[in-house]
Image (tube, rainbow, N blue to C red):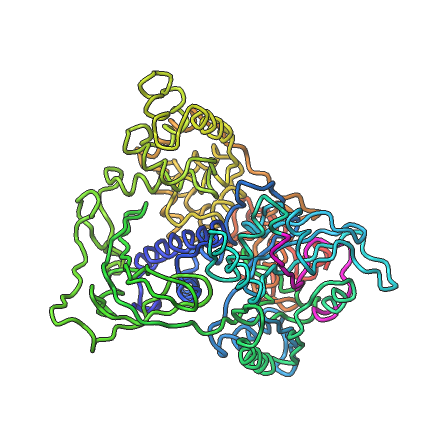
Amino acid sequence: MTDVKDMSAEQAKAEHQKLSHMIRSHDEAYYSHDAPVVSDAEYDRLRKRLLELETVFPGLVTPESPTQSVGIAPAKGFGKVRHKVPMLSLDNAFSNDELREFEGRIRRFLGLGPTEEVAFFAEPKIDGLSASLHYENGQFTQGATRGDGQVGEDITGNLKGVVDLPLEMKMQGTPVPELFEIRGEVYMSKPDFLALNAAQVANGGKIFANPRNAAAGSLRLLDTAITASRNLRFFAYAWGEVTEVPGATQSEVLAQFEKWGFSVNPLSRVCANMEEAIDAYRKIEELRASLDYDIDGVVFKVNRLDWQDRLGFVSRSPRWAIAHKFPAERASTVIEGIEIQVGRTGALTPVARLHPVTVGGVVVSNATLHNEEEIARKDIRIGDTVLIQRAGDVIPQVVEVNFEKRPEDSQPFKFPTKCPVCGSHAVKEINETTGKEDVVRRCTGGLICRAQAVERLKHFVSRNALDIDGLGAKLIEAFYEDGLVRSPADIFTIEKRDTSPGNLTRIKNREGFGEKAASNLFKAINDRRNIPLDRFIYALGIRHIGQGNARLLARNYLTFENLRSSLSQSGEAAGTAYAELLNIDGIGAAVANAIVEFFNEEKNQQMLDDLLAEITITDFEAPTRDSSIAGKTVVFTGSLELMTRQEMKARAEGLGAKVSGSISAKTDYLVAGAGAGSKLKKATEFGVTILSEQEWLDLIGR
């Protein structure tokens, strides 16, 4: 695999897009269906590679990557609950050195000296399902899953059946808070898991692969009585929306949780520094096999809450916490075939079909091989005996080939140079600047390629895009084959076109489809004729534009008319629009080029015209914040002394401001530190308000 530092921007862009697509698919399988398709180790490897790409090429940051999104949208069978405080995921460390680097980032962000100790709270990472519990005046009133981090599923009734979840907080001589949201993990013990599977076998029911899947499946049952019979349990470890935090440290708050009647993991402990934290990891790992519940790593959190508050969050995770996963489990099996899948951007992705093998109690039969270069680097062939690894719930990663067991008639795998779907040439693009070849081979067929067209339509109706209930991948494929849906606009005209008996018969006679199903589908489609701007931008499937960048664009342009007209300019106006796009903090050249290219493609303009004739895009409304700088654009320059630049930016964004990298007529504030240069001069020319560091901190109330 090419070292990220040796890659061209185009190579990095291509690999980033492929990784983002893979991770979104894995998130869907894991969070929505409780049926993961890759191993934790492989998933973590993909995310680590994505983070490496984004570190070297910051303009590639996209929301479908682990840096921008959490989980997936909530399922359809439950009501939705919006989290007032987002339920974020955690970044991962893969070695002790990465834990030390995590500590280093904290020190740099906070501007701490080398002698100032940073204490960490270490706790086992429970392999279960995250849940939030709302208590009002000590009474349990509502419970929800994490969902996509912003909106979860209302599972209040099911949570009431969790064995050790108190429906009323214990007073313990002190008044309970008016409002307190407890967060933690619902899990199933190993003995209860074995007993459940034995009962399932006896009754001819579904066999669960592991306790995590059993717990998640049980919480999503519509029959709360069955959920209550499965002895689910709960460990509390965090909090969300509260009227008051009962302590100054993580450990003090969790001690209060216990007094209120919640179970807190007994292996959790305070570590005076990172070396003690690393030692805690080793000790918990030694105890892992003896525990009666599954854990897959250790979580480390900065213990001081005032430091947690200053550190804040990135798009999908807190800066003050990290998870260190346990090593993956391994097994040997045979590659029975290699198939090539074609994605919506034309990327050809090889998938290994494995002889089914049980690893850590889970039967696995597939593994992604990433790209042509990965196959060549490891010399992977059909018929090879390979070592695979997995950790947690999912499919394996091919670690290495056992060359001693290679069949004598083995032949190197020949990666196709033509698309297996449409027969068009599949090429590796050349970066015009560097002359280097891309690592991903892509079909050149564009919209004539059935695979690309179908995958784009699937993306358009997916959960995080238009989220059309009942219009799933299989139905999109069927409608495409029948010629009923070939473009996004066709989805919204299908009912009108089905007025003819012939067309209606084609839908009603489809297996599992009838008049009622057709009626329900048409209603679900019509319910999505009004779509929020950020969802619509994401649904368009522009390369490098995931949920996070879609929200970023929506937040800056506010209306689709503004976005489209700005980016469809020509001549000098186009140059100005491009510069304004690059001024958005978080938008780099690769992303900007992809956006401009999309909006200046004639076929895309026609597609948008057809689509806008059928739907209404609602303007973006930024979250209301009680802040004097909400919606303002700010630029930081010079050497900042009262707070690190990183913390300054994080604080501004947390209060609803837009942070830009350059001065323009739209800039509201320039915060100038020592040695401010050209930006200070330009701000003066534009009449921008110029503030010192202290004036800025006074303005934001720090």
Q: Does the magenta portion include 155?
A: no
Q: Is residue 585 left or right of residue 407?
A: right
Residue 192 location in percent, x, y?
A: 58, 63
In the displayed orientation, state which residue is furthest to the right.
Answer: 173
How many numbered discs? 0
Residue at image location 43% in from the left, 69% down from the top: 360
Determine if residue 587 is in view.
no
Q: Quadrant of the N terminus?
A: bottom left
Determine if residue 174 is in view.
yes
Q: Quadrant of the C terminus?
A: bottom right
Corner quadrant of residue 447: top left
Q: Is residue 508 left or right of residue 93?
A: left
Looking at the rendering, the stretch of residues picked out in magenta corresponds to: 228-252
Residue 502 drawn above or below residue 603: above
Residue 137 location in percent, x, y?
A: 81, 51
Corner quadrant of residue 483: top left
Residue at image location 27% in from the left, 65% down from the top: 374
* Residue toward you, 22 or 541: 22
In the displayed orientation, state which residue is furthest to the front.
Answer: 202
* Residue toward you, 89 or 585: 89
* Residue toward you, 387 or 588: 387
Residue 439 drawn above or below residue 689: below
Q: Does the magenta portion include 247?
A: yes
Q: Is residue 579 left or right of residue 439?
A: right
Residue at image location 39% in from the left, 50% down from the top: 544
In the displayed orientation, state which residue is furthest to the left.
Answer: 409
Residue 698 location in percent, x, y?
A: 73, 57
Residue 502 location in percent, x, y?
A: 31, 18
